[in-house]
Amino acid sequence: MKTQVCVIGGGPSGLLLSQLLHLKGIDTVVLEKHSREYVLGRIRAGVLEHGFAKLMREAQCGERMDREGEIHEGFLIAHDGRLDRIDLHGLSGGNSVVVYGQTELTRDLYDARARLKGTVIHDVEDVRLNDLHSGRPSVSYRQGDEVVQIECDYVIGADGFHGVSRKAIPRTVLREYEKLYPFGWLGVLSRTKPVSPELIYARHERGFALCSLRSQVLSRYYIQVPLTDSVDDWADDAFWAELKRRLPDEVAARLLTGPSIEKSIAPLRSFVAEPMRYGRLFLAGDAAHIVPPTGARGLNSAASDIYYLYHAMLAHYQRGDDSGLDGYSAKALARVWKAQRFSWWMTMLLHTFPDRIDYERKLQQTDLDYLLSSEVAQRSLAENYVGLPF
Ligand code: APR
Ligand code: PHB
């Protein structure tokens, strides 16, 4: 088999890039380890920055997002029994975010790929990247007993944190930066009316909590838990009781509870791999970087990778100009690190750290006091939350 761009990974990053390139006449093949149902069964975050939403529209995948997604012009910070609002729209010069589940977004991307008859091959095993430093790289995979080889011009590693692409870069070249946090988020999805029309990020000495939503009838809540906890330790009642304890009384009083439809624990991690290019391989999205979910940057941090790669590929195929491809890693990493800084900062600001010394606790309190009393500090938060320009 032959293609121009072989994309490893059928998550949002790989599908979006494949769709954008296809619309410009560039041939792609997407290889996905799991079935479509499996990929669409994963519950992920649900806040899109305006730049990502714009890319979805450019990829002709924005119709349902624009119809069903909710525009959020602000969010709330709960602390010390009260609520303060961050006016994203006013503070960022008119920008906002779209609340639209990543699961729905991925479904739209799969539908779009199918509409254009794009090649997406599921259930591939033993994916291998070959000859990345030659002019003719290839990717091989196994499906059942059959081994298939795809010859291509470029390979995109969009196979998430646990994928194989990053591992194809030799250890002598690859540098990894990682920070692990001593807690995870226990998330619950419930078919209940959200407690607040806007997201509430809650700082509390018992631990962080977040009230989010997928729609007006579907709520998503999280609480910070020790890494040693498992989902079985948290019956629904225990979850709701703990969430209420971490919210201001007036919010807890109107929280509607119900059976959980999904419950999972995700550890928090910050991670960056450098460089994001090795020969003919280009990494994108979670394959190259991970953020803790506090600033809702996960997918948004992938958006700029896709945008830069898309334009770099267009310049190469349409004008023979390789400057975008050559500059990709440095350009992508510059924005990736800004998203890292912001996610780390929001995580440090809002969580309870078991081993923090009193001095650090005082600094954390001061950081929050400063934020809530300074318009300049809030502007910085808003600018980062709606998404820095690509
Ligand atoms: N071969 C082929 N596909 C693979 C392989 C492999 N060896 N390993 C993993 N994959 C697939 C996964 O099954 C997954 O569907 O690659 C896909 C990667 O998708 P994501 O993990 O969703 O990563 P990405 O597309 O970069 O999305 C960015 O934003 O909100 C964040 O972390 C969140 O999903 C998220 C991300
Ligand atoms: C979510 O809705 O899942 C969500 C929202 C905001 C975040 C993280 C997760 O910061």
Image: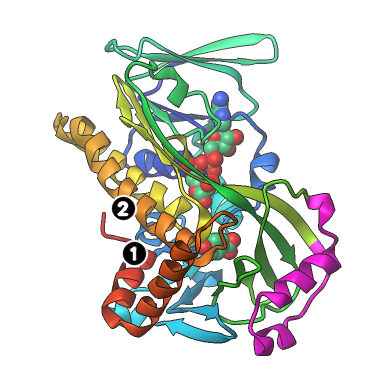
Left or right, 173 with reference to 16: left
Q: Is residue 194 magenta?
A: no
User: Relative to 153, does residue 375 appear above or below in the rendering?
Assistant: below
Disc 1 residue: CB within 8 Å of ligand 2: no
Q: Residues within 10 Å of mark 2 (few under 14, many from 20)?
A: some
Left or right, 250 with reference to 9: right
Q: Residue at x 32, y 47 (%)?
A: 337
Range of residues picked out in magenta? 231-260
Residue 29 in sight here: yes
Q: Are the residues tagged 1 and 2 within 8 Å (C-beta)? A: yes
Residue 122: x %, y % from top left: 62, 30
Residue 204: x %, y % from top left: 60, 72
Residue position for label 2? 338
Q: Which amino acid type corresponds to the residue marked 2 in the rendered image?
A: Lys
Q: Earlier in the sequence, mark 1 or mark 2?
A: 2
**Rendered-image quarter of ligand 2:** bottom right
How far apart marks 1 and 2 lie (CA) works out to: 8 Å
Which quadrant of the rendered structure holds the C terminus? bottom left
Q: Residue at x 68, y 70 (%)?
A: 219
User: Relative to 354, does residue 23 appear above or below in the rendering?
Assistant: above
Q: Quadrant of residue 20?
A: top left
Q: Residue at x 83, y 64 (%)?
A: 236
Q: Quadrant of residue 56?
A: bottom left
Residue position for label 1? 384
The foreground one among 204 and 335 is 204
Q: Main secondary structure of the magenta part?
A: helix
Residue 64 in sight here: no
Q: Residue at x 56, y 54 (%)?
A: 355
For the image shown, how many numbered marks are present on the structure? 2
Residue 357: x %, y % from top left: 50, 59
Residue 267: x %, y % from top left: 61, 47
